[in-house]
Amino acid sequence: MTQAKRGITAEDLYQMRYASDPQLSPDGKTLAYVENQIDESHAYQNHLYLRRLDVDDPQPLTSGFRDTFPRWSPDGSKISFVSNRSGKPQIWLIDANGGEARQLTCCKNGVSNPIWSPDGKYIVFSSILDEGETFADQEGTEEKGNAKAIHVGRLKYKSDDLGFIYEKNKQLAIAHVETGEVTPLSDGPYNHTIGSWSPDGKWLAITANRAEDPDFQHSVDVFLIPFEGGEWKKLTNSKGIFAYPTWSNDGKKLAYIGSELDTHLYAAQKRIWVYDFENGDYTCITADWDVQVGDSTIGDMRSPGHPNPGAVWTADGKGMYFIASERGNSGIYHVTLDGQVTHVVAGNRNIYGFSLHENEQTVVAAISDPFTPGDLYQVSLKDGEEKRLTALNKELFAGIELPVPEEIEFVAKDGWKLHGWMLKPVGFEEGKKYPMVLQIHGGPHSMYGNTFFHEFQLLAAKGYAVLYTNPRGSFGYGERFVQACCGDYGGNDYRDLMTAVQFACDHFDFVDEDRLGVAGGSYGGFMTNWIVGKTNRFKAGVTDRSICNWVSFYGVSDIGYFFTAEEIQANPFTNPEKMWQHSPIRLVENIETPLLIMHGEHDYRCPIEQAEQLYVTLKHQGKAPVSFVRFPGASHELSRSGDPEQRVLRLQYTTDWFDSYLVVHQKEKVEKPCKCQ
C-alpha cells in the first residue's frame, strides 16, 4: 500500500538544499559548484563540490564553512574560492585534486569577487575600505567597543546590503598568487566593481560611479584599468548604468549589460551593449528586442542573487550567450552582433546561472522550477539534450506533495493582457470550497515565475489556494509594461490585481469568495496595505517589510531620496500632495480587514518606522484587528536569506494568522459592503 504524501512544512526549510554557481574547468571535463544548505544548528553552510561530467559521483572539495565563488585557475590546476573560515570572507586556494586550502588574503573587512588573470599569476578582488583604511590593514585589527559618536557626512550613508556604510567604499586590488602581495588598483570616494581581464592580461574592465558626487548622480560607467599602471580609459558617457563587462576572445570588443538613463533607474529594461575598440564606439545590439536581459525571477530560496556571468562570448567573437527573463521564465539565449536572438535553453523554469564550454559544446545550467529549489543540468549545444547532474532534495521531496501551478491568462479592464498562476491546495477535492490567498511580489520591477516558492507551497499544504500574478510594473512583458506603474502606484496595478482575483473567483469553482486573504512584501506589502484600505473584500491580510507613507520613506530609506522621484514621480518639496495620495496610511480610516504586520528591525530599504506608523495608526483607530511582529537584527532580506529560524517563525506567523480568519471562522459569513474608491 502506497503511503500518502504530506504537505510541506515551514520547518522543511532546514532540510532543503540547492546548487549554485556552476564553473566548468578549462578543459570542460570537470565541474565545480556550490551546494547550499542549513546545518543542524540552523546556520547557513556552503560547500564546494567537484564532479567529472563523465562520472556520476560528485566529490566534496570543502566542508564545514561558508565557502563560495569557486573559480578555476587558467591551467585548471587550482581553484580559488571565498571562505569565512578565518572569520571574514577571504580568498583561499586549493589544489584541484584536493588537499589543504591556503589563505591568500587577510583583508580587514574581507573580500569578494576574485577573478584570475589570464596567466594565472594574479587575482583581482574587491574589498570595502573605510576612510583611512588600506589593503595593508589585516583581519583581526578591528576596533572593539561601540563608538561614542559617529559623524555622517554623506547623503548615502546606509545600505540594506551592508548596513551603515558612512564613508566606506568598494575598492579594487590585485593579489600575487605565489607571494600574497597586494597591490591597490583604486581609491577615492567611489564604489568599484570587477568585470574581467583582457585576454592579453594588460587591461581590467571594471564598472564604477566616479561622478563628482556619486550620491546624486547614479550613472555607472565602464572603465579600463591598465594592469601595469597608468591612466584609466572611460568607455561610456555617464548616461547609463552598466555592469558585467566581458571581453571577446580576440580582445577587440567588450560586451556589457545595462541601460541608458532616461527618467528610469529601476524600471529600465537591461540590454546588451558592445564596445568596438577598432572604431572607438559602442552600440546596443538588443535595442530592438523588448525583453529584460538577466534573471528577474523572484523567489524565497536563493537570495540575494548569484554571480552573473554576463554576456559570454562565442569563440569566433560573432555572438554571445546570456540569461533573459520573459513571461515568468528565465532562459539562456544567444545573440549575434547584428541583434539576431535565439532561445538556446528554454522551458517553464528559472535559469539563474550557467557555465559554458564552447569547444565541448556543453552548458551547465543552474535551474529551478516549481518543484526544484535549485539543481544543475548539463545541456548539449548540439542537440539540446539534457542530463540532470544533481537532485539535492530527492529524498526529502519523495514524501511531500507539491501541487502543480496552473498558468492563467486574463485581460485587464483597459485591455492589457495579464498573466499569472493558480496553485491548488494539497489534497484537493473536486466540489469542495477552499480559501484563497493573493500573493503580491516586491520590486515592483521583478517577476513571479516558474520557480520554487516555499511560502506558496506551505500555504497550499495548509489548505489554501494561492493566486500569484505579474501586474503592470513587472519585468517579463516588455518595457512599456514594466514602466506602466511609475507615477501610478495603487492605480492600474491595483486594478490588475483585483481583476486577477475576480478572474480566479469566476473561473475556479473551488475558490470560496467569502474567504480571501492577501499578502505581500516590500512593494507587495505596500500593495497589501493599499488593498485593505480600498476594499473589505479580503478577510485577512499579511504585510511584510512594507511601505505605508511615501513622505517619510523619502528620508529614511537607503534609496528613498531617489526611488520616490522615479516610482511616485514626486518629492516632499515640489509635490508632497502626490506622495500623500499614493500613501496607504491615508486610507487607514477605511481599514477593517484583520492585518498582521511583520518587519525586520534592521531593514534599511523599507525601514521599520513604516510598520510602526501603520501599527500605531491602526491600533489607535480601533476598527481592524492588528498584530505587529518585529524581527530583531533582520534586514529587508528576512524572508529570503535572513536568519533561518526567523524565516520559519515568519512563515508560522503567516499561516497562523490566515488560519485564524480564513479557516477557524470559515462558517462566519461576514457581509460588509465594498469600500472601493
Image (cartoon, helix red, strand yellow):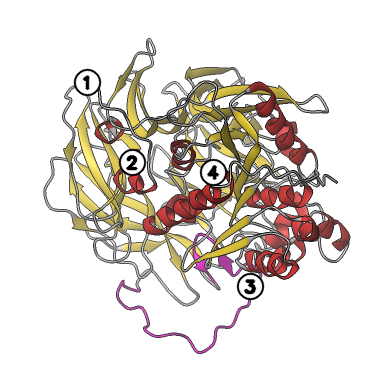
CA gap, disc 3 and disc 4: 50 Å
CA gap, disc 3 and disc 2: 38 Å
Pointers 2 and 1 in contact (CB under 8 A)?
Answer: no
Q: What's the residue type where badge 1 is placed?
A: Met
Q: Nearer the viewer, mark 2 or mark 1?
A: 1
Q: Which of marks 2 and 4 is in front?
A: 4
Pointers 1 and 3 in contact (CB under 8 A)?
Answer: no
Pointers 2 and 4 in contact (CB under 8 A)?
Answer: no
- Along the viewing direction, whichever of 168 and 585 lies nearer the viewer: 585
Percent of width and height locating residue 451: 47, 32
Q: Is the magenta stretch mostly helix, strand or loop?
A: loop
Q: Residue 118 carries which label?
A: 2
* Residue at image point 33% right, 51% down: 123
Number of numbered labels in the structure image = 4
Residue 147 within the magenta-colored segment of the rendering: yes
Look at mark 3 in the image and give the residue it sits on. 154
CA gap, disc 2 and disc 4: 61 Å
* Residue at image point 61% right, 32% down: 292
Q: Residue 30 carries which label?
A: none
* Residue at image point 18% right, 44% down: 61
Mark 4 residue crowding within 10 angstroms, few (<14) / some (14–19) / many (20+): some
Look at mark 1 in the image and give the residue it sits on. 1
For marks 1 and 4, the one nearer the N-term is 1
Outermost residue toward the front in this view: 667
Q: In which quarter of the image is the N terminus?
A: top left
For marks 1 and 3, the one nearer the N-term is 1
Look at mark 4 in the image and give the residue it sits on. 663
